[in-house]
Image (cartoon, rainbow, N blue to C red):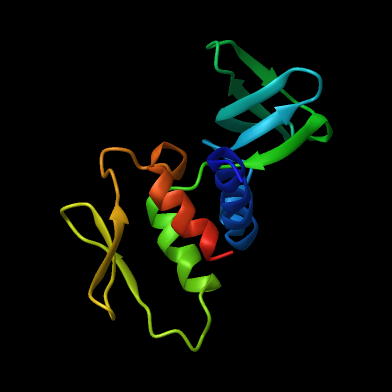
Amino acid sequence: MKTEEKLKAVTDDIRNKLPRLMKLEKGCLIDVEYTGMWEIVSCEFIHNEAVYSVINEFSETIEIRKADILKIIGKEPTILDCLEWIKLVQPKSSWSSYAIIMDGRLVDTFAEKTICKVDLSKPYIKDQSEELVNFLYGLL
């Protein structure tokens, strides 16, 4: 399986297990009917109707008033979301406990073993190494 497919599977599972990543708020990715993927940059209520300002990858900005034309994709999971997700998916009988050390290593603290390097300058999982994606995919 390709790294992109593994990343999509892990990202989808993280979004499923951490519902806060699916809230329609700033940073949430949405698919607007017939126009592709947009990111919510702000939301305000006008006459009890939500108005979302969204931007796409070409820096085009529009306002959307009807929530029924949106498909929620969710926020991009971060490394911290990843640690929270690991806690949820690892077996209760597991003795493993994971942490990210200041030098950028993801470690199994119980086994005192380095799993892989994490680029601390890149907060999103999608920007991390193939090694990390493979490790996370192995937890599914």
Residue drawn 58% across the image and 47% down it? 6
103 w.r.t. 122: above or below: below
Write the residue at 50% across / 64% down.
Answer: 85
Q: Position of residue 54 (x, y in %)?
A: 60, 23
How many marks do you count on the picture? 0
| Residue at the outermost right position | 68
Is 86 placed above or below 3 here? below
Q: Position of residue 123 (x, y in %)?
A: 35, 42
- Out of 71 and 5, give the one closest to the viewer: 5
**In the depicted structure, whether residue 39 falls above or below residue 123:** above
Residue, x 39% and y 51% (percent of image)? 79
Give the percent coordinates (x, y) of residue 11. Answer: 57, 49
Nearest the eye: 117 or 23: 117
Q: Is residue 124 left or right of residue 54?
A: left
x%, y% of residue 96? Answer: 37, 79
Residue at the extreme left:
103
